[in-house]
Image (tube, rainbow, N blue to C red):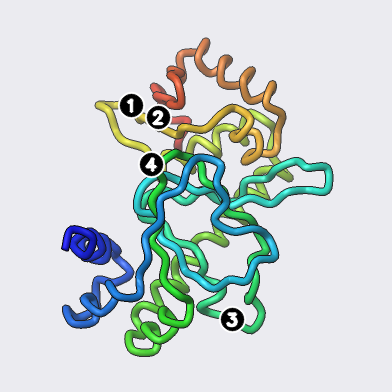
Amino acid sequence: MIKENVKQWFIDSVKLFDDLNVNDKTALQNVFTEKIYNKNDFLFLQGDEMKEFIFVNAGRVKIIKNGENGKESIKRILNEGDYYGEKAVLDPEHFSTHNNTGKVLDKDTVVFSIPVEELKHLCEAYPIIYKKIVKKMMANYHRLDKRIESVMLKNSKDRIIDFLKEMAEDIGKPVGYEMLIKHNLTHQEIANITGISRQKVTTILNEFKQQGLIHLERNAILVHDLDLLR
């Protein structure tokens, strides 16, 4: 009973399913599976068959691409409430396998998954779900396009500022006239997002701190000057 209640609470918390009736929400409990992962576990590898649509209920997952030299590029971070697998639902013919790798960032990360086929059936019954998935995917593409533009056209400091803006939008919490960003990322992971070296990340963040723009804490940044985020 407790297990089913957890699934029910989870389904009720997912905005994607807001428009489902009570019976369909109840039926969903039978198709969802829950799994707890440790830090650095892999949810899937590049080339794996894309069978499941995943939701992060607790913790975080990074979507990465590994280069030939072994360098890791972080394309996206899935925070609590985020989902992944949109391409397989919208265009299964061209996206039957993963073109990225999903790696867990936090211990005790809880992931709920549903077979892609089941979600496709839901989209047919509730076109509003399909529209929400399309809207979310387009927003993700827009963000990735902005990040590529930042990496290609901006200097290192501006890339770090763009990173702060992105994190503030995703997970930032206002604290008076300041913004607290509990990113829980290493400087190497920030480097893998922004396309600059780890040493440069450290240097720039320390410069911002010395200028009184931010305060650095372990795995968190408090932005004093909100003009950085505008």
Reply above or below: 173 against 178: below
- In the picture, which quadrant includes the N terminus? bottom left
Q: Check contact, mark 2 vs mark 1: CB within 8 A.
A: yes
In primary-sequence order, the first of circles 2 and 3 is: 3
Query: Label 4 to label 3, Cα distance in Å?
Result: 31 Å
Q: Where is residue 114 in the image (x, y as percent from the top left)?
A: 41, 71
**Image spot of residue 31 (x, y percent):** 35, 75
Q: Of helix, strand and loop, which one carries label 4?
A: helix
Observer-nearest of 180 and 13? 13
Residue at image location 39% in from the left, 72% down from the top: 132
- Say few, some or many: other residues with alpha carbon within 10 Å of mark 3 (under 14 / 14 to 19 / 20 or more): some
Question: Amino acid type of disc 1?
Answer: Glu
Mark before the other along the chain sequence, 4 or 3: 3
Q: Residue 226 carries which label?
A: 2
User: Which of the two marks, 2 or 1, is nearer to us in this view?
Assistant: 1
**Height in image: 213 above or below 164?**
above
Mark 3 / mark 1, whichever is N-terminal: 3
Kindly indicate the quadrant of the structure image that contains residue 56: bottom left
- Residue identified by numbered label 1: 178
Q: What element carries label 1?
A: strand
Residue at disc 2, secondary structure: helix
**Circles 4 and 2: CB atoms closer than 8 Å:** no
Residue 171: which numbered mark, if any?
Answer: 4
Circle nearer the viewer, 3 or 1 = 3
